[in-house]
Amino acid sequence: MNAAYFIAGTDTDVGKTTIAAGLLHAARQMGKTTAAGKPVASGCEVTPKGLRNADALALLAECSLPLSYTEVNPVAFEPAIAPHLAAREAGVSLTVQSLLKPMQHLLAKQADFTLIEGAGGWRVPLADQDNLSDLAKALQLPVILVVGVRLGCISHALLTAEAIARDGLVLAGWVANIIDPKTSRLEENLATLAERLPAPCLGRVPKLKLPGAATVAEYLQLDLLD
């Protein structure tokens, strides 16, 4: 059975790509075919082949289907700024419709396990009044939430979960990514998240010196997803 999810984060720099790559690797270890999308990425490097984003390349490396870079990351911007600002500077109309078709194309490949990764937190602006969360709504994908565990993460996580539910989407699971292992009352914070988030915890990933996909996959439980 084909399964697809939207990867969201409680904020920027919470490890969405690290966790997404780990989930894809775990799926491959289970014998599943994998595909992934990063609809829009800013902070890209200029290469002879065009703009390339490190996060999108990390996702592509864990795709078992023969995908091109552009299929994974159709819209790329060089400045490491909010996507809607980068798009405005580049003269590009960044709307849900402009991102929807390439992601539908990716989902149509029907990999056993597909992830579409957002940018930043849940309410990342696009053009006009569109938000990146509207893409998740248009695709009607269940959401996996990456919680960057540090001071303040409980409120960020619960507010994001409320917004996901308000948008009519299902929170399929969440991952605790320990950004700050010295967080005061770490265990109590994790217990509160487990009590209050309306979905199973798919794993607790510690602060890793080398957070490669294979290493991260060891801390994840894909079988907890419906």
Image: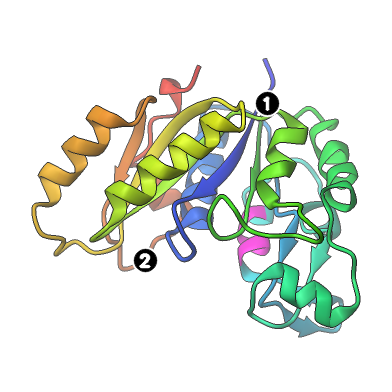
**Residue at the image point whose x is 65% and y is 72% from the top:** 82
Please indicate whether residue 197 sits to the left or right of residue 194 in the image: right
The relative height of residue 174 versus residue 205 in the rendered view (above or below) is above
Q: Nearer the viewer, residue 82 or 163?
A: 163
**Residue at the image point whose x is 43% and y is 22% from the top:** 223
Q: Quadrant of residue 219?
A: top left
Dot 1 crowding, Cα within 10 Å, few <14, some 14–19, many 20+: some
Q: Find residue 226 and report its horizontal and vertical position in percent.
A: 50, 16
Query: Which label's residue is closer to the chain start, 2 or 1?
Result: 1
Q: Find residue 118 and report its horizontal and vertical position in percent.
A: 63, 52
Q: Is residue 109 visible?
A: yes
Q: Find residue 179 and report its horizontal and vertical position in percent.
A: 30, 62
Q: Quadrant of residue 59?
A: bottom right
Dot 2 crowding, Cα within 10 Å, few <14, some 14–19, many 20+: few
The relative height of residue 45 versus residue 97 in the rendered view (above or below) is below
Which numbered disc covers residue 150?
A: none
Q: Secondary structure at mark 1?
A: loop
**Residue at the image point whose x is 69% and y is 21% from the top:** 2
